[in-house]
Amino acid sequence: MNKKKRRRFKPEEKFTIVKEVVSKTSSVTEICDKYGIHPNQFYKWQKEFFESALEGFRESSHGRTRAAESREKERQENQIRRMKDVIAELAAENIDLKKNDME
């Protein structure tokens, strides 16, 4: 029985292999022959590659959304702070006016 030893590929190697096909530098058949992998294995890696890329875009999009929400929250907090300052100033003026009327 002539059984081949199972090879383990590092994530970086898988990335490079899939990238070669995606960037159109080689065909799936050429890549599989070059690295001694079965086409089914390649397509499994390619699927993982694209799913991870999609997840990266989702995270990136959420990051922008969170940043926009953070800026809006900060803007609202600044507005509330200004309004509180105005209210405090008006209350102080009101107290001063009442004191002057009593005198």
Image: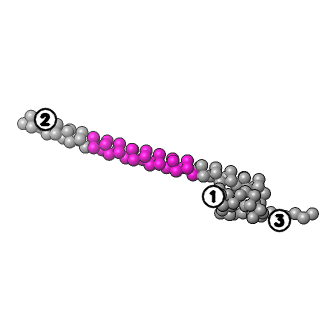
* Amino acid type shown at disc 3: Lys
In the image, residue 17 above or below residue 67: below
Q: From the image, tell me which residue sits under label 2.
A: 98
Would you say the residues marked 1 and 2 are in contact, meaning their CB atoms lie under 8 Å apart? no
At 52% from the left edge and 50% from the top edge, which residue is drawn?
60
Looking at the image, is mark 3 or mark 1 earlier in the sequence?
3
Front in this rendered view, residue 69 or 80: 69
**Image quarter in which the C terminus is found:** top left
In the image, residue 70 above or below residue 31: above
State left or right for residue 85 relative to residue 37.
left
Residue 8 visible (yes or no): no
Nearest-to-viewer mark from 1 and 2: 1
Which structural element holds mark 2? Answer: helix
**Separation (CA) of disc 1 from disc 2:** 79 Å
* Amino acid type shown at disc 1: Ser
Q: Residue furthest left?
A: 103
Q: Using the image, tell me which numbered label, if any, was put on residue 23.
A: 1
State left or right for residue 101 relative to residue 82.
left
**Image quarter in which the N terminus is found:** bottom right
Residue 26 visible (yes or no): yes
- How many neighbours does mark 1 have within 10 angstroms: few (below 14), some (14-19), or many (20 or more)? few
Which structural element holds mark 3? Answer: loop
Q: From the image, tell me which residue sits under label 3.
A: 5
- How many neighbours does mark 3 have within 10 angstroms: few (below 14), some (14-19), or many (20 or more)? few
State left or right for residue 13 relative to residue 6.
left
Front in this rendered view, residue 11 or 39: 39
Q: Using the image, tell me which numbered label, if any, was put on residue 86.
A: none
Q: Please provide the residue range marked out in magenta.
A: 56-84
